[in-house]
Image (spheres, rainbow, N blue to C red):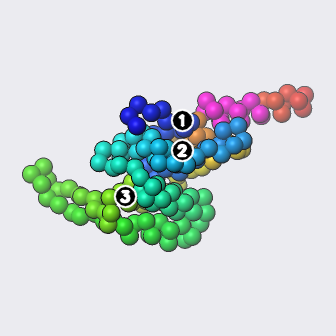
Amino acid sequence: MPGTHDPRPLTGEPLALDLLNTRWNQEGVVQDLLADVEGLGVWLESTGLSGGHHPDSRMLRHTLQARDALRKAVDGALEEGAKAIDAVLEHGRIRATLTAAGPGELHEFSNPAWGPAWLAARNYLELLTTAPDRIRGCAGHSCILHFFDTSRNGTRRWCSMAACGNRAKASRHYARSKES
C-alpha cells in the first residue's frame, strides 16, 4: 500500500472528517474510497494509521460503521448520531498512564480491528469539545465533503476555494452577466 495515491479531492482534515471524506462527488457520481480493503489501506496510509494496523474485511466493516455513525451525527441530528457513535466507542477506551516523560494516555481496543473506527469516533468527540460550530459541510451545490473551519473569523464555506468556491463564484458571475 505504501505510495498508493489517495484520489480524494480533500485530505488532511481531522480524522473524523477525513473518514467522512472517503465519499465524495465527482462529476455527479459518488466515489467511495472504502469500497474495498485496498481503499481502506490507502486511507490508513494517508491518515498515518497504517502502522500496526493491517486492513482486512473486519476492519473495513468497523470503519464503515464509524463513517455511517459520523454521517448521522454530522449531517443529521446529534441526538440521532449519538447512539451510533456510542456503539463504536464501546469497543475501546483511554487508559491514563504515567511514564518517565510524564502523564499520558493509551488507547485500548476490544479488538485491534476496531482501532481506526474508534479513533475516528473519539476524534469527533474532541472536535465537539473544541469548537462544534466549526464542523461544516461544504456549501457547494453537489459537494458532500466536510471540513473543520480553522479560518480566523470562522466563515469558511467551501471544502476548497479552488474547486467548489470557484464554481460558486463562476455561477454567480454567469447569473449576473445573463441578467444584464
Q: Is residue 36 visible?
A: yes
Quadrant (top left, top right, bottom left, bottom right) of the C terminus: top right
Residue in the image at 23% along x and 64% along y? 95
- Residue 7 is labelled as 1
Q: Give me the C-alpha separation between circle 2 and circle 3.
A: 18 Å
Tell me where residue 118 sits by quadrant. Answer: bottom left
The amino acid marked with disc number 1 is Pro
x%, y% of residue 54? 35, 49
Q: Is residue 164 magenta?
A: yes
Q: Identity of the amino acid at label 3?
A: Ala
Ranked by sequence position, the earlier of labels 1 and 3 is: 1
Q: Which mark is residue 33?
A: 2
**152 to the left or right of 173:** left
Residue 128 image label: none
The answer to whether the residue labelled 1 contacts the one labelled 2, judged by CB atoms less than 8 Å apart, is yes
Q: Secondary structure at mark 1?
A: loop
Q: Secondary structure at mark 3?
A: helix
Q: Earlier in the sequence, mark 2 or mark 3?
A: 2
Q: Is residue 109 magenta?
A: no
In front of the other: 110 or 86? 110
Range covered by the magenta-colored residues: 161-172
Badges 1 and 3: C-beta atoms under 8 Å apart? no
Where residue 12 sits, quadrant-wise, is top left
Separation of residues labelled 1 and 2 (CA atoms): 8 Å
Q: Name the spot of residue 128 as percent of width and height, x first.
A: 45, 59
Badge 3 is on which residue?
A: 113
Residue 163 as seen in the image, left or right of residue 59: right
What is the distance, in whole Å, between disc 1 and disc 3 at their CAs? 24 Å
**Label 1 packing within 10 angstroms: few (<14), some (14-19), many (20+):** some
